[in-house]
Image (tube, helix red, strand yellow):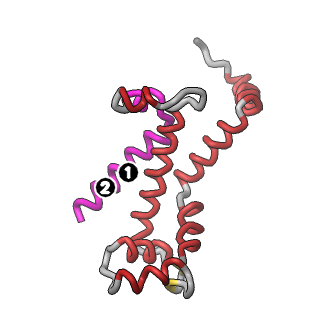
Amino acid sequence: MELDLKHVASDIEMWVEHHPWKAAFYAASAIGFFAPEILSTPALEALGFELAGVRAGSLASKIQPVIGPIAARSVFAIWQSARMGGYGIEYVNGGVRALIALTDATVAACNPLKDCKGLISDGGQQLLGDSSATTALAVVCGCLVGLNILLE
């Protein structure tokens, strides 16, 4: 099979016209993977983590007294650090990328017209054959981030 470069753009345009939801999903997935702050910043702010600290009256401000003194590198500290642009940003963005990878793999493996019993029964083998390039990148990056966390 030979690739005809003259028709690539029109082929892509035709595919997008016939699969608008898939195209939107793939585009959003790629953007979220390569720029996870687009997703993590609003999520952290919605929880009450701001640049200057925890916002009064937010969910984070209600949780903080319940958990007591905030330990260094706890989930709460990591989320606040991430919102302030500190060490936590690597952890949070790694988590966003992992969620994107999981979503990509699930969508790739589970056709909406059938159930996901095959995915479960084969131990996830379908994931390896059908996952997108974004998923592969996310798995590699997730492993590197996980290794970095273990080595610290």
Q: Position of residue 42 (x, y in %)?
A: 59, 68
128 relative position to 28: left or right:
left
78 relative position to 110: left or right:
left
The quarter of the picture where the C terminus appears is bottom left
Q: Position of residue 53 (x, y in %)?
A: 50, 85
Under tag 2, what secondary structure? helix
On whether residue 132 falls in the magenta region, the answer is: yes
Q: Residues within 10 Å of mark 1 (few under 14, many from 20)?
A: many
Residue in the image at 39% along x and 32% along y:
120
Disc 2 and disc 1: Cα gap in Å?
6 Å
Which residue occupies the foreground of this view, 65 or 138? Answer: 65
Residue, far top: 1
Q: Which mark is residue 45?
A: none
Which residue occupies the foreground of this view, 106 or 33? Answer: 106
Q: Are marks 2 and 1 in contact (CB under 8 Å)?
A: yes
Residue identifier under label 2: 146
The magenta stretch spans which residues?
A: 125-152
Residue in the image at 36% along x and 26% along y:
122
Which residue occupies the foreground of this view, 28 or 8? Answer: 28
Q: Amino acid at mark 1?
A: Gly
Residue in the image at 44% along x and 72% along y:
79
Q: Amino acid at mark 2?
A: Gly
Which residue occupies the foreground of this view, 65 or 82? Answer: 65
80 relative position to 26: left or right:
left
Residue identifier under label 1: 142
